[in-house]
Amino acid sequence: INHLFTTNELKVEEIQQILADAMKFSEGMVWKPEGQMFSANLFFENSTRTKCSFEVAERRLGLSVIPFEVQTSSVQKGETLYDTVKTLEAIGVNTLVIRHGQDRYFDELVGRVNIPIINGGDGCGHHPTQSLLDLLTIYQEFGRFAGLKIAIIGDIRHSRVARSNADALTRLGAEVVFSGPEEWFDQHSLSSQKFKPIDEAVLQADVVMLLRVQHERHQKKGSFTAADYHRQFGLTLDREKQMMSHAIIMHPAPVNRNVEIADSLVECKRSRIFKQMENGVYVRMAVLKRSLESIQGGYTNENSYSE
Ligand code: CP
């Protein structure tokens, strides 16, 4: 079964295959699983992009999406994640997307569940489909990863996006540097990576990838005001002027405008922030295809492009 829990578990060729399929979906490729297939999206943490784009992806692939809301489910009666997943499997759901606040929530499911599970984000751990959509956005822009300099800036310790992207980008041949407040570095998982002052990182980067300040994961109140953070570690209008002419801006969103990035830069010419969201649908279609193909056939009509 092709689950997807982290980018680390994907070989480079598998990443390339997912990106190739995602690009074909962006060009209108049609792929459908054989017969009726059911999916459910279990979001124990809030989401707009990931949840909604998975749902669009599932519907575009012809899946029947079973509505599941944690707040109205038997999770509220104390049912565990494992029993919830086994229940959905038993009643015929064919694939699940799960976002959960606990790091590596999926460890207890591996080998005990017979339907593919796609990780929509686990605590401060991983967010593989965000990483894949980021990769697609970078590839569309530059046509390669090798030799690119990617600056990942901000709340690194709490960022599953930073972890997933650093792993995948490095394996694909890009150079990843980090910047942001030292108190938010993660010395354990990122100790081998390079840290640079923001002004240096921005100057040299082909991609400036900003991370959201994750207030909800901070144990103590931060030592920065929004204005302080923006001045010291944010992409200000002045810093944007220092970027190379071809360089692009990315952010997984939601964006704290005027904190990580100046308001007017969110939709500026360099920004690919909304392109990332669009690409999320194609990447999630490709990831669902990979998972569903591992349990059952499907068919592609190569001639069936919408354009
Ligand atoms: N980027 C991202 O994961 O956004 P959501 O939390 O809205 O899904």
Image (spheres, rainbow, N blue to C red):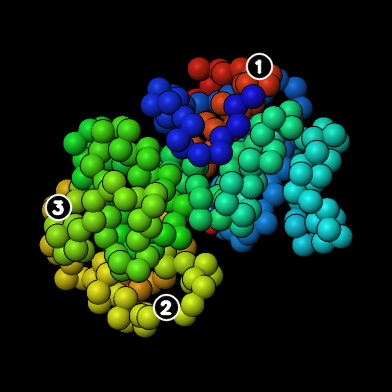
Q: Identify the amino acid type marked 1.
A: Gly
Disc 1: residue Cβ within 8 A of ligand 1's nearest atom: no
- For residue 60, above or below residue 241: above
Mark on residue 297?
A: 1
**Mark 3 Cα within 10 Å, few/some/many (few <14, many 20+)?**
some
* The C terminus - image quarter: top left
**Mark 1 Cα within 10 Å, few/some/many (few <14, many 20+)?**
few
Mark on residue 247?
A: none
Disc 3: residue Cβ within 8 A of ligand 1's nearest atom: no
Looking at the rendered image, the disc whose residue lies closer to the viewer, 2 or 3, is 2
Q: Identify the amino acid type marked 3.
A: Gln
Looking at the rendered image, the disc whose residue lies closer to the viewer, 1 or 2, is 2
Which is more N-terminal, label 3 or label 2?
Answer: 3
Label 3 element class: helix
Q: Are marks 2 and 3 in contact (CB under 8 Å)?
A: no
| CA gap, disc 1 and disc 2 | 50 Å
Q: Residue at (35%, 68%) from the top-left corner?
A: 183
Can you identify the residue that label 2 sits on? 222
Question: Could you say which is closer to the camera, residue 177 or residue 206?
Answer: 177
Can you identify the residue that label 3 sits on? 204
Label 1 element class: loop
Pinpoint residue 201: horizontal percent, then vertical percent: 19, 57
Q: Residue at (53%, 70%) from the top-left corner?
A: 216
Pinpoint residue 153: horizontal percent, then vertical percent: 30, 59
Looking at the rendered image, the disc whose residue lies closer to the viewer, 1 or 3, is 3
Pinpoint residue 259: horizontal percent, then vertical percent: 35, 73
* The N terminus - image quarter: top right
Whether residue 10 is visible to the viewer of this picture, yes or no, is yes
Q: Identify the amino acid type marked 2.
A: Gly
